[in-house]
Amino acid sequence: MIVSLRKKFIIVSAFSIMIVFMGIFLFLSASNIAQTNRVLDTLTDAIASNGGEFPAFRPSERSAWSDWFVYSDVITEETRFSTRFFTVWLDQAQQISQVNMDAIAAISESDVETYAREAAAEGHTRGWVSDYRYKASPTDEGTMLVFVNGNMHRNMTFRQLCSAFFILFGSAALILILTIIISKRAVRPVADSYEKQKQFITDANHELKTPLTLILSNLDIVESEVGKNEWLEDIRSEGERMGLLINKMVELSRMDEGDAPPVLTEFNISAAVSDTVSEFQPLAAERSKTLLSEIQPGLSYHGDEALVRRLVSILLDNAVKYCDTGGCIRLHFCRKHHPVLTVENTYANVDELELDKLFDRFYRADKARTFSGSFGVGLSIAQSIVTKYHRSIHAYKKERTIGFRVELK
């Protein structure tokens, strides 16, 4: 159990770290891409506002064509010499009427025409065509398209994001390693508490069973001398009940430990379920309850046969105890993607049941806790069996019926 708890702690920590760091990386990516676009948009705005030519540098007018909040120093005295751009004018029919390629050399006129047609076809005011950020501005004659080469800015953004990724990845790996190292210390208080709990149950088992055995033994002696009577029968009944409770507590403790590996074999699970149902037929009939079963024959299963039989016994025992007098118990077993077992029984007060608490230890639907042969730990043991071996069980209810569904994955 402690090992499982430690694994869950590490998995949850790793998942949390991954989510946080992924969020940080996505934020950095979006922020860097947005900043790159804004820088290039500042340049296209400046060129478009100057009729397709790069404007002369005038510090006093910089705020007129620069977003100072994001990049107040985008355009300097040297920017005009480092910016590669070209301008294309389109007429009213969206045909190229003029091209200015004075500020670029690494592109042919045919490429310019291709990029202009792609930008015009998109119909957007701003966008990307290949490595060029463009802006479309309406003119009296048609449209002016300004294209600024953003390859350098894109490469810089990519390198920054790569650096951020490796830094975040390394940080996440380091944090995960530290989490694994300190996880043992983190779960130590729980481990200590759990060990004390197991030791308490072991001690309680010994301390209670010894005097209980003496009481029942002395009770036999008293009965042989004075004969049976109502008071001695009450003492024996309560003593045997206490013995059953002690055994259940020990069984739960052993299930929680989970140290013993399961005995996995290939066996006929249909026969195992059928045998268990046969064992409960007389008990159900004795209590005026009908037990019906529908079992798909010939199914095999690779697992622990003893635990499967124990699981079916717990569910049938629970159904027999809580089924209404004269009611019906139905067991259905078949293979879908994997073997599925359902056990249902009629129960008049089904609406009063709290399904989320049925698997709690010592939970009893009867608030007065009138003893009916059950301590409220059977379903807890069933849940321990299915979760221990990666199976699933859940309770459901419908009109006057309570049911349990087990998937033996």
Image: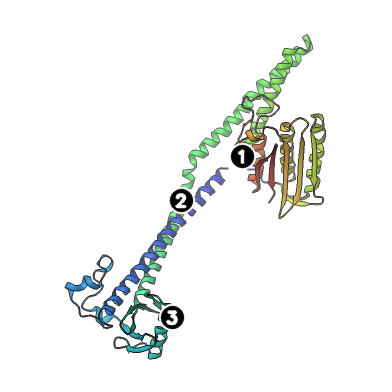
Q: Residue at x 71, y 43 (%)?
A: 307
Q: Residues within 10 Å of mark 3 (few under 14, many from 20)?
A: few
Marks 1, 3: nearer the viewer: 3
Disc 2 target residue: 179
Quick check: 127 left or right of 221?
A: left
Query: Mark 1 belongs to which amino acid?
Result: Asp
Q: Secondary structure at mark 3?
A: helix
Quick check: 275 left or right of 239?
A: right
Quick check: 246 left or right of 33?
A: right
Give residue 222's position: percent from left, percent from top.
Answer: 75, 12
395 and 193: which one is in front?
Answer: 395
Quadrant in which residue 195 is drawn: top right
1 or 3: tag closer to the N-terminus: 3
23 and 309: which one is in front?
Answer: 23
Query: Mark 2 belongs to which amino acid?
Result: Thr
Disc 3 target residue: 121
Disc 1 target residue: 256
The quarter in which the N terminus is drawn is: top right
Quadrant in which residue 35 is drawn: bottom left
Query: Mark 3 belongs to which amino acid?
Result: Ala
Give residue 328's position: percent from left, percent from top.
Answer: 77, 36
Give residue 147's position: percent from left, percent from top.
Answer: 34, 81
2 or 3: tag closer to the N-terminus: 3
From this view, report whether residue 299 is shown above or below residue 371. Answer: below
